[in-house]
């Protein structure tokens, strides 16, 4: 059974940093690209970032480019999102999602999702 | 970026109704479209990929159609478990983009 378990969310002041983690199990982690998708309260889904199976290809939404850094550790079956210079508009539930391709910029939809971790940005 | 527009934003229907949701892309995405269902407090669930391919385990009352710029998700006979928000997502052009969602409510 595929499981994606996010952690690391919490309350953070504007301008500060936070690191999210996602622990994956039930599939061959290093065969697939992995992604972060977020959902602001009461809003729709927004793809945030993705990383290819071997970390050679990484992509970001314009809204987080230069502030967020995605990474993965295939030995630990884990995905990470380092978020810095956080803004009020970054407040959202952050989902870890398994891609359906090994490359982040090629034909990815999301067949498994974690339960999400909530990031609250407020002073 | 490709813009995905869903209609309607909200839909009121009764159990047993046939329900259709439309998703339009700002340019042709061939058949590279997925549909997700999201219930309150839970993660999205993949229903359909490649416009019309049913994900394993998804009831056959769900179907998808379309290509190019116009797509539909149809629920042939709405069940109580189907009241949820539905999202389309294109995966032809990076970055991946979603529609704004269609909430299916009880009439």
Image (cartoon, coloured by chain):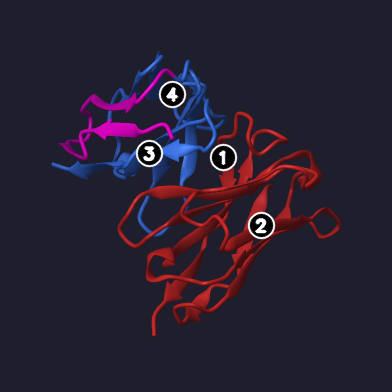
- In space, the residues marked 1 and 2 are separated at their CA atoms by 17 Å
Q: Report the chain holding disc 4.
A: B
Near mark 4 (Cα within 10 A), the count class, few <14, some 14-19 or many ≥20, is few
Q: Which residue is mark 3?
A: B87
Q: Relative to A10, does residue A69 appear above or below in the rendering?
A: above
Near mark 3 (Cα within 10 A), the count class, few <14, some 14-19 or many ≥20, is many
Observer-side mark, 3 or 2, equals 2
Horizontal relation, residue A117 to residue B101: left or right: right
- In space, the residues marked 2 and 4 are separated at their CA atoms by 37 Å
- Image spot of residue A2 (x, y percent): 67, 48
Q: Give yes or no for contact between labels 3 and 4 (Cβ–Cβ under 8 Å).
A: no
Q: Relative to B27, does residue A13 appear above or below in the rendering?
A: below
Residue drawn at (75%, 44%), measured in percent from left and top?
A: A27
Queried whether the magenta region covers residue B4, the answer comes back as: yes
> In which image quadrant can residue A65 be found?
bottom right
Observer-side mark, 2 or 4, equals 2
Q: Which residue is mark 4?
A: B60
Q: Report the chain holding disc 2.
A: A
- Chain identifier, red in the render: A
Task: Give, as a single range, the part of the protein colored magenta.
Answer: B1-28
Horizontal relation, residue B15 to residue A71: left or right: left
């Amino acid at each position: 059974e595929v499981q994606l378990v996010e952690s690391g969310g919490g309350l953070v002041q504007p301008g500060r940093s936070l690191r999210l983690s996602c622990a994956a199990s039930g599939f061959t982690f290093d065969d697939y690209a992995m992604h972060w998708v977020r959902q602001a309260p009461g809003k729709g889904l927004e793809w945030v970032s993705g990383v290819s199976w071997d970390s050679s290809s990484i992509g970001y939404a314009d809204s987080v480019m230069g502030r967020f850094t995605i990474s993965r550790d295939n030995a630990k079956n884990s995905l990470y999102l380092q978020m810095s210079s956080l803004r009020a508009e970054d407040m959202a539930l952050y989902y870890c999602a398994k891609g359906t391709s090994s490359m982040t910029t090629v034909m990815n939809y999301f067949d498994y999702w974690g339960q999400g971790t909530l990031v609250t940005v407020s002073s | 970026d490709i813009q995905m527009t869903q209609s309607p934003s909200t839909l009121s229907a009764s159990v047993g109704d046939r329900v259709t949701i439309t998703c339009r892309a700002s340019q042709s995405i061939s058949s590279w479209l997925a549909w997700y269902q999201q219930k309150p407090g839970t993660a999205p669930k993949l229903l359909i990929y490649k416009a019309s391919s049913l994900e394993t385990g998804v009831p056959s009352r769900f179907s998808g159609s379309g290509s190019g710029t116009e797509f539909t998700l149809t629920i042939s006979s709405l069940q109580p478990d189907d009241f949820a928000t539905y999202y389309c997502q294109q995966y032809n052009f990076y970055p991946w983009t979603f529609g704004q969602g269609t909430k299916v409510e009880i009439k």
